[in-house]
Image (cartoon, helix red, strand yellow):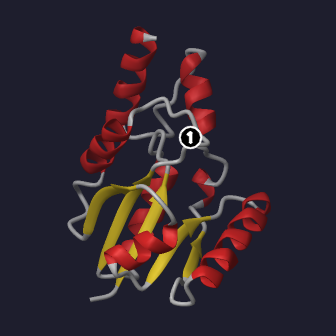
Amino acid sequence: MRKALFPGSFDPVTNGHLDVIERASKLFDRIIVTVAVNVEKNPMFALDERVSLLKKVCDEFPEVEVTSFDGLLVDAVRKFDVAAVIRGLRAISDFEYEFQMAMMNRSLDDRCETIFLMPGPSYSFLSSRMIKEIASLGGDISPFVPETVAVALAEKKKIG
């Protein structure tokens, strides 16, 4: 069974993320979508909320498992025994950072292969940061996120 890991903050998960998940699931037998704990970021959604949202929106993909991890990506690669790491690239600006990360991960463990997938053109400009900003200013995010996520963002706005 060929497994791949799709790590990310997913704060929140967008239709662009789902596009990459769907396309990766055509290449691998199993996709492990894992919410990474990143101490450098101040997420809007708690770790358990992001995992829960991902589980709901990935329910239509039987080959997808959703989990979380804390630590180095190469440790997650070993833990989940995957053949590759999936990373989404939206623009050339993403490539430089992602390329450096892929090369560093391979330096730490030469079994850590990275596959870059570009989202469809209609999602190439999406970022979780933009979605949160649009939502906080009362804009319509429904074309960019699953309905479950739009509802969760509306609830966060009411609470905040």
Residue 148 percent coordinates (x, y): 31, 34
Image check: 52 left or right of 26? left
The vertical placement of 2 against 5, above or below, is below
Residue 11 in the image: above or below residue 90: above
The percent coordinates of residue 97 (x first, y second) are 74, 63
For mark 1, give the secondary structure.
helix
Above or below for 125 versus 120: above
**Near-viewer residue (23 or 78):** 78
Q: Where is residue 127 in the image (x, y as percent from the top left)?
A: 61, 44
Q: In this view, does 152 lie above or below 158?
A: below
As rendered, which of 76 and 50 lies closer to the eye? 76
Q: Which amino acid does label 1 sit on?
A: Ser
In the picture, measured across the screen, residue 61 lies left or right of residue 130, that is: left
Label 1 packing within 10 angstroms: few (<14), some (14-19), many (20+): some
Q: Quadrant of residue 88?
A: bottom right
Residue identified by numbered label 1: 128
Please report the residue visible at 34 percent of the width from the left and 71 percent of the height from the top: 31
Which residue is pictured at 61% across the width and 36% down the height? Answer: 129
Figure disc tally: 1
- Tell me the quarter of the image containing the N terminus: bottom left
Q: Which residue is located at x 60 percent, y 74 percent?
A: 116
Residue at 46% in and 49% down: 37
Give coordinates of residue 2: x percent, y percent.
Answer: 33, 87
